[in-house]
Image (cartoon, coloured by chain):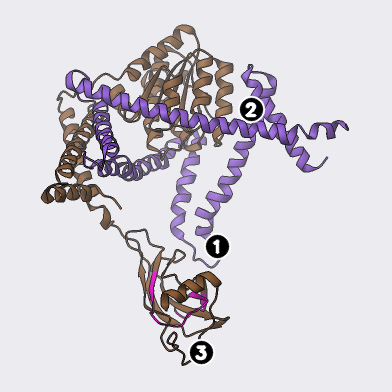
Chain colours: A brown, B purple
Amino acid sequence: MGRLGLFLVILIGPVPALAAGSAGPDQARPVADSFEAVDSPNDAGGVIELSWAMSPGSKLVDSMLVTRSKAGGPENVLSVVSPVSTSYRDTTVANGVRYSYALVPMLDGRRLAEVGPVAASASAQWIHSGRSGMLIITVILAAFILYFIRHGRKGGELYIRQIAGLSAVDDAVGRATEMGRPVLYIPGIMDMDNIQTIASTVILGRVAARTAEYGTPLMVPVSKSVVLSVAQEVVKEAYLEAGRPDAFQKDSISYLTDDQFGYAAGVDGIIVREKPAAIFLLGAFYAESLILAETGRSVGAIQIAGTAMPSQLPFFIAACDYTLIGEELFAASAYLSREPKLLGSLKGQDVAKLFFMVVIVLGVIASTVGQAWDPASEIAAFIRNLTHVE
Amino acid sequence: MSWEMVGIWGGALLTLCLYSFLYRDNPFYKFAEHLFVGMSAGYWAIYTIFNVLKPNWWDKLVGAGDADPQLIMIIPGLLAVLMLMRVVSKLATYSRLPLALIVGAGAGLQLVSFFQTNGLKQVENTVIPLVGSGVGPTIDNLLIVTAVVCGLVYFFFSKAHRGITGGMANVGITMLMVAFGASFGYTVMARISLLIGQAQFLLFEWVPTIPRILGL
């Protein structure tokens, strides 16, 4: 009857209470039981999760009100949920405040006997229990990175293979110098909290050092105010280190707009009017990537691009002379500077890749053999659990 | 002329101004470009004030509504003031403090999400049996495992791409290029649909208004 009743509620809407004494729902039973309110786990707080189970054979209702109250405060209706709902997330709570919740079944506009109250308070958790595998792997890999940094600082040899796009940086600046045209550097359209923008500003330092050395004008239009500040600092520092502080022009690093296509239109205008001989497109890009790269190509500039955005890489590969693919962008700062600290970090990341390759190969073998031999499938499940992140 | 008509004509003329760039740089494009850059810069400034600064900082600081004031919000306010020190040359050094905080916090926070999505999630989903249920799934699984392992070899910087390493790296970059080709085609289709949308706007919304404007 319970399932049929729920089906009817869904099919024809509210179902009136059955006559007392008939072979129907028990009028005295509460609509829901096992009503619980708990703090949502593994979060920054601000969420309380309510759950309940429908009492089998209880009265069928139209809907249920979820109500909340603070100690000594009025009762507020948070939401009206369907009679078949069994959970609700309250995302409007403050951490550390105790709230009381109740479920109020509604039938024909009348409030029936409420379920509850139950009380709970939200809090933030420092440790995410579903990410312990990630913590272990991060600590191991961080240890490798620190080892290689130490090794590099002690003068140990740290070999890095040649990366064509980065070897061309000096050539591109040299070409601009010979042609007497400026160098244009575009650090992407994301803010300084994006790791690609951070990597890009490090490479900007290297490019600025070369333009300072060669006396070539450098233009850096940016789309975020914080990137403007960082880029000005980086370029100024590079010019100081190159012994050419007089050549530093603050206005050559300019803010255009935060808007994606407004920025693209502005940069296109700069490209066609200033006709830079070398263009660097390094950072996080979205749909404007091809617009910029194609315009750069139309003025005959040598273009070095790099991004970790998989959807934009094809456009850079098609329209630019050199393209740094994903990880190569992050390796660039170490490759260009040859600083032991950065090279050590890069070596540590290589160990991480080796570690992942070994884990994948072992996992695939275990998974394949596990189809016929259970212990191997358990190993595969262990590897999956180790790398699983909630 | 109604405001709707003004909007259609403004949109159409600016679209044509921007498309004129396909011929060459010209005053019409320059006008549309400067209008676009200027208006978007102004729009984002206001957007940032009312959708970022006010709800995330000011409202919390003063306790908007029935919320209690959060005095800890004085700290980001101070950092913002330090950022503005850039305009005073003698105090410009202090602007590096909030910059360092942004860069450091950004890198730290991104580490978790990058490691999770670009590292562990990929590994977890690659731990699959080579033999699937049928020929098709088996080929799929072989391709996935080969592409991931060889792709990782390509991005291994500690060894020159020679010998076995070079061979695997070549397989890796070939797989990447095939994926990029597919992505290129897919995205170009999406761009063409945008172009079609704009052409439809010109043809079906703007062109029919021309006789009305001309009194025909």
State which chain disc 3 sits on. Answer: A
Measure the alpha-carbon separation of dots 1 and 3: 51 Å
Mark 3 — residue?
A: A19
Q: Are marks 1 and 3 on the same chain?
A: no
Residue A389 screen position, x and y as percent: 28, 50
Task: Indicate which label's residue lies in the foreground, 3 or 2.
Answer: 3
> What numbered label is drawn on residue B33?
2
Is residue B32 or residue B186 the one in the foreground? B186
Residue under the point 40% across and 67% down: A48
Task: Tell me if mark 1 has few (under 14), some (14-19) or many (20+) residues whose alpha carbon lies within 10 angstroms of its own.
Answer: few
| Residue A256, visible in the rendered structure | no
Task: Tell me if mark 2 has few (under 14), some (14-19) or many (20+) residues whose alpha carbon lies within 10 angstroms of its own.
Answer: many
Task: Indicate which label's residue lies in the foreground, 1 or 3.
Answer: 3
Q: Describe residue A51's horizontal placement relative to residue B160 as left or right.
A: right
Query: Circle 2 sits in a helix, a strand or a loop, which is it?
Result: helix
Is residue B212 or residue A122 the one in the foreground? B212
* Span colored in magenta: A50-76
Query: Circle 1 sits in a helix, a strand or a loop, which is it?
Result: loop
Identity of the amino acid at label 1?
A: Ala
Identity of the amino acid at label 2?
A: Glu
Mark 1 — residue?
A: B64
State which chain disc 2 sits on. Answer: B
State which chain disc 1 sits on. Answer: B
